Image (tube, rainbow, N blue to C red):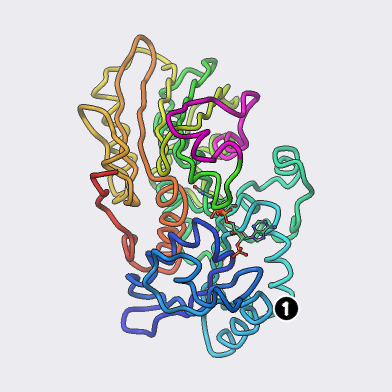
Amino acid sequence: MTEGMQKLPTYIYGAGGLLCGELLRLLPEHPHLLPVCAITRSGPTPAVRTISELHPHLALDLPLSNPEQGIEALAQDLELGEAVLFLGMPHGESAGTWRAIRERLGPLAERLWLVDLSADYRIRDAAAWEVAYGTPHGDSPGLAAFSYGLVEFARQALVGCRRIAAPGCFATALQLACLPLWRAGLLAPQGSWVLNAVTGSSGSGVKAKASTHHPHRNGNLCAYALDGHRHELELLQACASPGVTDSGVTDSRATGSKATTPPAVIFQPHSGPFVRGIYLTAVLPLAGTTRVDELRAEFHAAFEDAPFVSVRDSGAPELRHVLGSNRAELAVNLRADCALVLLAMDNTLKGGSGQALQALNIAAGWPETAGLPLSGMGIA
Ligand SMILES: NC(=O)c1ccc[n+]([C@@H]2O[C@H](COP(=O)([O-])OP(=O)(O)OC[C@H]3O[C@@H](n4cnc5c(N)ncnc54)[C@H](OP(=O)(O)O)[C@@H]3O)[C@@H](O)[C@H]2O)c1
């Protein structure tokens, strides 16, 4: 789509979820997208008919649809031209849903821009995905059509891609912190990467669980996934193909690591007593003697043209700098023989809905920042 054309009708599936709520907060500001349909499993009910009744923070007059009505309306829009569909469902649900929609749409699916927020299309190897997620993959034939949507490492490869797998929230933080030095060949081939991250409760979605319930979470801090976390797989997949993006296109920023074996990754997530945000501390053993200004130069070069990554030369990133924005804030220091990389970002935006929109912007040829907040709220 080029400037001056009509806005594309935009469909949201899983509308009751947290990320879809965030997306629908952003979409009205987008110059090329028009939210037309919010699809929810239960459809409209007498008590909840519009999106603002489902998400009262949204000042948006958008009726709810059940899946059948919503996909029928999407098919009609596609008869007329292009449309956009965001899937905001749990992992394991998304793949089967998209497979069924694709079959219903037939050749019309070619006109659709699809962004999946779940984990279902992020891992190229269906068998590896099944081991990590403990369930059969619902659409392994559909996997190859998807591109991994971490714009900072696939800006060129994403252009024109109509099937985008938005990265996981922790996976985004891990890759932004680790890949610049890995791809520059500055990390020790044998060293273990120690990656500690604290996430807010919104990372677990809209439904209250014992571990996200306020009395449990407030004033508390605890580790979980002590045997490893699924998002490590996204980091390892990226490390396994240094310098080459998912589509096989070499990205100009990705120079290629000298290491041939995958890194040993020790990622330990923690549940923090706040709602939004991820704070990551990464300790990355260096291959040789490196000055701190060389480390910082690598990060500045890696994110030179990245409007949503800020690299600090002093001080530490803070959640309150980035919450409410699509920005990740990074700092790197030299500690003993390791790079200490700190990162703060909003899991619901740069780790979720925001970067999904950012990837679509790049894919569709729109300005990368269209519809996306650059400034944080300051008061978190
Ligand atoms: N939260 C984050 O920080 C974050 C960040 C990055 C990626 N993600 C991923 O993005 C996806 C959406 O995340 P979210 O936090 O928005 O999740 P969520 O709040 O739990 O919402 C998921 C929505 O999916 C719909 N759904 C369809 N089938 C379902 C089923 N069988 N069980 C439960 N819900 C079902 C529901 O919407 P309706 O009731 O409207 O049908 C539900 O509200 C997930 O795959 C998640 O892992 C989340």
Residue occupying image coordinates x 43% and y 54%: 355
> In terms of depth relative to the viewer, which is nearer, 217 or 108?
217
> Going by the image, does 134 lie left or right of 244?
right
Residue 223 sits inside the magenta stretch? yes
Pointer 1 residue: 104
* Ligand 1 - quadrant of the structure image: bottom right
> Going by the image, does 144 lie left or right of 311?
right
Amino acid type at circle 1 is Arg
Instruction: Say which quarter of the image contains residue 378.
Output: top left
Is the N terminus in the top left, top right, bottom left or bottom right quadrant?
bottom left
Residue 260 position within the rendered picture, expressed as x and y whole percent measured from the top left: 58, 26
> In terms of depth relative to the viewer, which is nearer, 365 or 217?
217
Residue occupying image coordinates x 50% and y 76%: 50
Residue 298 position within the rendered picture, expressed as x and y whole percent measured from the top left: 31, 32
Q: Secondary structure at mark 1?
A: helix
Residue occupying image coordinates x 48% and y 30%: 257
Instruction: Say which quarter of the image contains residue 320.
Output: top left
In magenta, the rendered stretch is 210-235
Residue 375 position within the rendered picture, expressed as x and y whole percent measured from the top left: 24, 51
